[in-house]
Image (tube, rainbow, N blue to C red):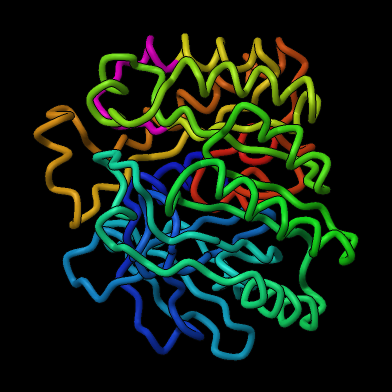
């Protein structure tokens, strides 16, 4: 699977697949993809995450090739474009115990279903049990912690820090993605996290004001800058959604701004979630980005990261390590 094929798969996002090919579909509990069943497909050294659905009209279809070794083929408009295997997940993704603490959020970003789903908040003991079970498989290479906001960002940082302190004994890299607070980077670093992710969501300020009205972009950017001082370059990441109606020039400018801070942007294709039809009222230009656009922007980001002496392949946790949802510089392009 090369970058062009992966871009096509990400742009489509959904594949028609027989449930018998899956151990069991995984349902995300975090962010814009929350509540959606998915699976991971691996081809060579590359992987991609696709929504799993029985849909005869889907442009992507998964077919079994070899029952003996589990090989499958993905067809695009009825033409085979790639072969590989369905990759087993550990917790949320392969080789990581990737857990969501609070599956709910007081913020109401219009692209995100989490406020509508109103999921549970895992207890400290429940999280420790889940990680312990993951560890016994022998496949846990990293631990990643994310969270919505049940009551306040400060409460979530405190919970995440407590969890991290209890998990450092596994001696694997730990990454955390939360909404920042004034001292969250220092708190989480001292707890034992080695990487941090604070999401800008978009660098188009007009879209941000409308789609993320409860959040403060300038505060997130300042927190990212502070995080680089605490965690170091290549250890601070930020999700940047592509498809909310922003221009390519806005994306490119935003990538430069983040990279010059020492932050690695994660260019994430928009998920148009059925629980958030209101996104079209706030972002009338919202649309899943094309494969060509994703590939062009990923190549641009690779050049900017190189110019800023950043390397996404150094990252050991969370999305940049998984690579399933994105075209990751230095790994895919």
- Say which quarter of the image contains residue 134: bottom right
Q: Is residue 118 left or right of residue 131?
A: left
Residue at 47% in and 15% down: 218
279 up-or-down from 309: above or below: below
Q: Is residue 316 left or right of residue 57?
A: right
User: Where does residue 136 sit, x and y in percent of width and height?
Assistant: 80, 83
Q: Is residue 97 left or right of residue 171?
A: left
Count every numbered label the image shows and give the total.
0
Quick one: 264 or 82, which is closer to the camera? 264
User: Where does residue 320 sit, x and y in percent of width and height?
Assistant: 64, 43
Q: Is residue 249 magenta?
A: yes
Q: Is residue 244 magenta?
A: yes
The boundaries of the magenta stretch are 241-251
User: Where does residue 124 sit, x and y in percent of width and height?
Assistant: 65, 69
Residue at 32% in and 23% down: 208
Residue at 74% in and 42% down: 188
Quick one: 323 or 214, which is closer to the camera? 214
- Say which quarter of the image contains residue 36: bottom left
291 up-or-down from 90: above or below: above
């Amino acid at each position: 699977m090369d970058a062009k094929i992966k871009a096509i798969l990400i742009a489509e996002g959904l594949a028609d697949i027989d449930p018998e090919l899956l151990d069991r579909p995984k349902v995300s509990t975090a962010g814009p993809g929350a509540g959606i069943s998915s699976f991971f497909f691996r081809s060579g050294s590359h992987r991609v995450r696709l929504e799993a659905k029985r849909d005869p009209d889907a442009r992507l279809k998964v077919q079994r090739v070899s029952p003996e070794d589990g090989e499958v083929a993905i067809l695009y408009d009825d033409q085979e474009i790639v072969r590989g295997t369905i990759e087993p997940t550990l917790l949320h993704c392969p080789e990581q115990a990737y857990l969501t603490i609070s599956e709910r959020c007081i913020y109401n970003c219009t692209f995100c279903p989490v406020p509508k789903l109103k999921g549970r908040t895992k207890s400290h003991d429940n999280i420790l049990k889940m990680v312990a079970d993951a560890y016994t498989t022998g496949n846990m290479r990293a631990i990643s912690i994310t969270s919505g906001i049940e009551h306040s960002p400060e409460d979530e940082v405190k919970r995440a820090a407590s969890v991290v302190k209890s998990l450092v004994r596994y001696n694997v890299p730990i990454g955390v993605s939360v909404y920042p607070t004034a001292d969250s980077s220092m708190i989480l670093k001292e707890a034992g996290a080695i990487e941090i992710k604070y999401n800008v969501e978009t660098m188009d300020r007009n879209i941000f004001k409308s789609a993320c009205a409860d959040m403060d972009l300038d505060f997130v950017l300042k927190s990212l800058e502070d995080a680089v001082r605490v965690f170091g370059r290549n250890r601070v990441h930020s999700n940047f959604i592509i498809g909310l109606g922003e221009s390519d020039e806005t994306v490119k400018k935003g990538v430069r701004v983040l990279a010059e801070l020492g932050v690695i942007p994660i260019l994430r294709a928009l998920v148009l979630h059925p629980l958030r039809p209101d996104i079209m009222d706030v972002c009338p230009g919202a649309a899943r980005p094309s494969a060509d656009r994703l590939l062009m922007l990923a190549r641009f980001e690779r050049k900017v990261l190189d110019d800023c002496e950043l390397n996404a392949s150094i990252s050991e946790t969370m999305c940049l390590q998984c690579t399933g949802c994105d075209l990751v510089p230095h790994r895919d392009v």
